[in-house]
Amino acid sequence: MPSIELSTADSDAIDRAADLLRGRRTAVLTGAGISTDSGIPAYRGAGAPARVNPMTIQTYLGDEAARRRYWLGGHLGYRTFTSPDPNGGHRALAALEQHGDVTGVVTQNVDGLHLRAGSGRVVELHGTMHRVRCLDCGQVFDRRAISEQIDRLNPWVTVPENITLNPDGDVTPETSEGFVIPPCTVCGGMLKPEVVYFGEFVPPARFRLSESLVHGSDALLVAGTSLAVNSGIRVIERARRRDMTLIIVNHEPTRADVWADQVISAGTTPVLQALASRLGAL
């Protein structure tokens, strides 16, 4: 990706943020905005595709036709969703962790790019698209194995080479008539990608991991999220209770800007790279 020029105002804001973070143990909270430079669309903000009816847990559990559409759309989009590489923003955060500045990353993303970039301590708040769990017996499967099972059950399905992804990593199929939903190969039960759907709560144990990361830090760096989802705001609230330094990097305004010590209204990739450079990690 070509380098993106930062304005003088952005550079000054990054200088102030670097001064605030220097010498502090920094936890990081990220959202979809950090992955857009890898080609994964975001839910919100300028240029985000419309998402009228995202899958809810109630619909998934109660509507077999909706489950068929979801699994077919997810199967069509999975290879494309998992093919993007980490971008410079992901790698900058990994470098900051290795340098000793960042204590870890709490991410609202399900794409696994922080781990692939080399971040060692990552809390995937909303789960991951790379695993599937049986809701009946609890068995966990690698998503690639489920994709192979879908291919065997639905040999007529052809995955197109060029598709337009939705923010969930799926596509909208023309029809799901005749599609066979993969069952659990252990008990025959209902499978579900290990992600948190709309209307579903973040597992308490997972949120406690994010709390532990925040409590072990002195500052919180927020990157690429509008904080429209309550799970992100809950992380912000934990930081506010501890009176931690708060830095926000996001193109669009966020719900927490009023509490931030520094807001940088620019792209995450150039800003995080510049921060890592100023802190000596790059």
Image (cartoon, grey):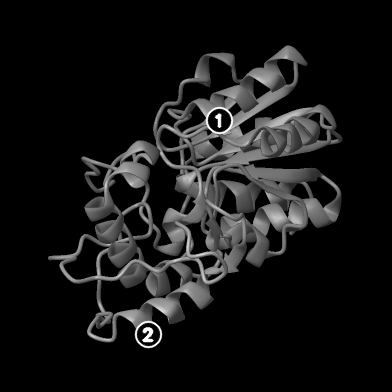
Residue that numbered label 1 is attached to? 232
Taking 2 as reference, is 235 left or right? right
The residue nearer to you, when weighing 220 against 188, is: 188
Residue 210 percent location from the top left of the image: 71, 36
Residue that numbered label 2 is attached to? 152
The residue nearer to you, when weighing 138 against 156, is: 138
Can residue 55 be seen here? no
Q: Residue at x 84, y 54 (%)?
A: 99
Amino acid at circle 1: Gly
Q: Residue at x 21, y 60 (%)?
A: 172
Examine the image and state in which quarter residue 36 appears: bottom left
Give above or below for 116 relative to 46: below
Is label 2 in a helix, a strand or a loop?
A: helix
C-alpha span from label 1 to label 2: 39 Å
Residue 150 percent location from the top left of the image: 38, 76
Give above or below for 168 relative to 115: above
Amino acid at circle 2: Arg
Q: Are marks 1 and 2 in contact (CB under 8 Å)?
A: no
